[in-house]
Image (cartoon, rainbow, N blue to C red):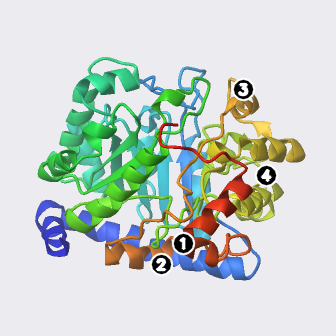
Amino acid sequence: MYLRMAKRLMLETDKRLLWKLAYLAGWKGLRSVQKHKRRLKRGEFFPPFLYLSIINSCNLRCQGCWVDVAAKQTKIDLAALNRSVNESKAMGNAFFGILGGEPFLHKELLQFLEGQPDVYFQVFTNGHFITDDVAKRLRRMGNVTPLISVEGTEIVSDQRRGRADVFSQTMQGIQNCLNNKVLTGVCTSICRTNIDDLLADRWVDTLIDMGVMYCWFHVYRPMGPEPNPDLALSPEQLRRVRQFVVDTRATKPIVVIDAYHDGEGRALCPAVTGFTHHVGPAGDIEPCPIIQLATESIHDQRPLRETFNNSSFLREFREMTAQHTRGCVVLERPDLLIELAKKHNARDTTQRKTAIAELEATIPRRSQYVPGGEIRERNLVVRLAKWLAFNDFGMYAKHFQADDWSDPERASDSAATTLQLPVLNSRE
């Protein structure tokens, strides 16, 4: 598998783009994590990776979307984008995730990306606006990888995304990237209606045959103004997703990303570990994209390093969540977020102003935290990479002891007490 992956990288990619990925996202990204570790030892904080939702508008209406895609357009202007990235670069950061809405609806997106050649960008997109000309510009830049979302087969995609002909337009966007040898990824929000079609070897083999270099299987989270709990995965299906990711990494010549487990298979939350935080379309600094609460903004009249370092809201979010779960606090303990928001007088960063009401209506459910049921990484390269750059940075050490992970029965009892959740059976 390792040789097949190396062969793909050598024969199917633009070598200049591969070098930029290795240097900007790899080498400089690793350095940013090491600087993060040193800051933590000094009692300081600045996340080594940032996600920027640069606009709220989108041409699709996906099931369960938490973004105000149909509301008045809100976006981060070019000056604020450049200022935020430049201040982050001064802290050692070199990788940024660009989200929306649909990022390509931001008229200054390409100008912004071209103006920051010394960092790497991953753009989350539906691919509908990636024409051949846009793909050519992305190739010339070399520091951008589009992560294009595919939500199912043609019928399921149209249903999931609220529009007709979504699948074919998305696939054309992918093909435009591949025709121009742009390093391209495909992501999927796995739910009950697409799990059998896309969590499958045949789908991964199709991506490999097309020339896609990496994929990402998110897990659907019933959040936002119109959550659809019927789409959420059962505990058995969640385990199936994790097992598939681990097995695919070990057997297929394609990179499979996940952001919710360390190399030993233990659950973690990137926001809780301080690995990343999120900036919304209005500039609000949030723990993560689905927690639409904030007390600070990139537009505050102080350096970004001070904003992150001095935020008692973000600090208590990390510490509070680490005390209760290694999984997703939104799914497992929405009550804690409500309590935190009231304590810090956090503002609702949505235009609909229903974030608290949505949390109050959320029915707690299991997430990736399954103590005693960890699935360890089989791919040695992935295990090494996670050990070096993607771990808990000691955030959970005070609350989750090593013995809790070696004794399944004890871990399950501990989890039920800590999470205050019912033990879910396979039918729930």
* Callout 2 secondary element: helix
Q: Inspect the image, locate mark 3, and give the three-letter code of the amino acid beneath it.
A: Thr
Q: Residues within 10 Å of mark 2 (few under 14, many from 20)?
A: some
Residue found 68% across the figure and 78% down from its top: 39
Residue most toward the front?
Answer: 409
Question: Which residue in the structure is indicated by mark 1?
Answer: 391
Q: Give the image location of residue 28, x and y in percent.
A: 45, 74
Q: Which residue is mark 4?
A: 301
Amino acid type assigned to the residue bearing label 4 in the image: Gln
Q: Horizontally, is 383 left or right of 172 in the view?
A: right
Q: Quadrant of residue 3?
A: bottom left
Residue 297 in view (yes/no): yes
Residue kind at label 2, given as amino acid type: Trp
User: Closer to the N terminus: mark 1 or mark 3?
Assistant: 3
N-term mark: 3 or 4: 4
Residue denoted by label 3:
354
Q: Earlier in the sequence, mark 2 or mark 4?
A: 4
- Marks 4, 1: nearer the viewer: 1
> Disc 1, disc 3: CB below 8 Å?
no
Q: Find out whether the residues at labels 1 and 2 contact each other: C-beta distance under 8 Å.
A: yes
* Residue situated furthest top in the rendering: 164
User: Where 50 falls versus 150 (above or below)?
Assistant: below
Measured in 3D between alpha carbons, the distance from the residue under mark 2 to the one under mark 4, in whole angstroms, is: 37 Å
Please tell me whether mark 3 sits on a helix, a strand or a loop: loop
Task: Mark 4: give few (<14), some (14-19) or many (20+) Cα within 10 Å.
Answer: few
Residue 387 shows which numbered tag? 2
